Amino acid sequence: MINNIGIPDALYKYYPKSTWRFEGDDNLNYDALIWEDIEIEMPSKEELLKKVELVREEYINTQYQRDRASAYPSIQDQLDTLYHEGYDGWKASIDEVKSKYPKPGED
């Protein structure tokens, strides 16, 4: 997935109100970028590639969130645990997932 992160992702994140398009199907090539915004200055190639790297780093650093989201019990199961086992039982089930997929810097 990280290899799919490119210029469009950086533009959406760092220039959300700008208007642009790519010439042809080449949306990974800076030279194919057509900047249509007259109010926001087009970023340089170097600036934009740095932003792409920041988006990739953020994606890597938040992998634990995606892992946790798919590992947590469903809301229905969490409510059932709360009802039958109380807060401590519910917290134990959540903590199990959190310890399996720790936040970077917390392991």
Image: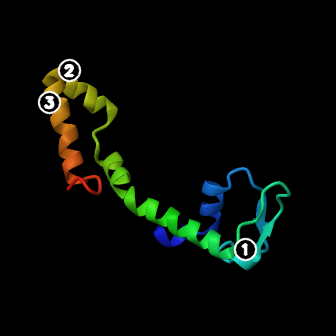
How is this picture coloured?
rainbow
Kindly identify the amino acid type of the residue bearing the numbered disc 3: Gly
Query: Element at badge 1?
Result: loop
- Residue 92 appears in the picture as rendered: yes
Numbered label attached to residue 83: 2
C-alpha gap between disc 3 and disc 2: 9 Å
Q: Earlier in the sequence, mark 3 or mark 2?
A: 2
Q: Earlier in the sequence, mark 2 or mark 1?
A: 1
Q: Residues within 10 Å of mark 2 (few under 14, many from 20)?
A: few
Indicate which label's residue lies in the foreground, 3 or 2: 3
Name which quarter of the figure residue 12 lies in: bottom right
Numbered label attached to residue 89: 3
Kindly identify the amino acid type of the residue bearing the numbered disc 2: Tyr
Kindly identify the amino acid type of the residue bearing the numbered disc 1: Asp
24 or 14, which lies in front?
Answer: 14
Q: Earlier in the sequence, mark 3 or mark 1?
A: 1
Left or right? Give the position of 58 relative to 25.
left
Left or right? Give the position of 101 relative to 88.
right
Numbered label attached to residue 25: 1
Left or right? Give the position of 99 relative to 12.
left
Query: Picture coordinates of residue 88 (x, y %)?
Result: 14, 28
Q: Residue at x 34, y 48 (%)?
A: 70
Query: Picture coordinates of residue 42 (x, y %)?
Result: 76, 65
Q: Residues within 10 Å of mark 1 (few under 14, many from 20)?
A: few
Q: Residue at x 79, y 73 (%)?
A: 23
Above or below — where is 27 with respect to 59? Answer: below
Name which quarter of the figure residue 15 lies in: bottom right
39 or 75, which lies in front?
Answer: 39
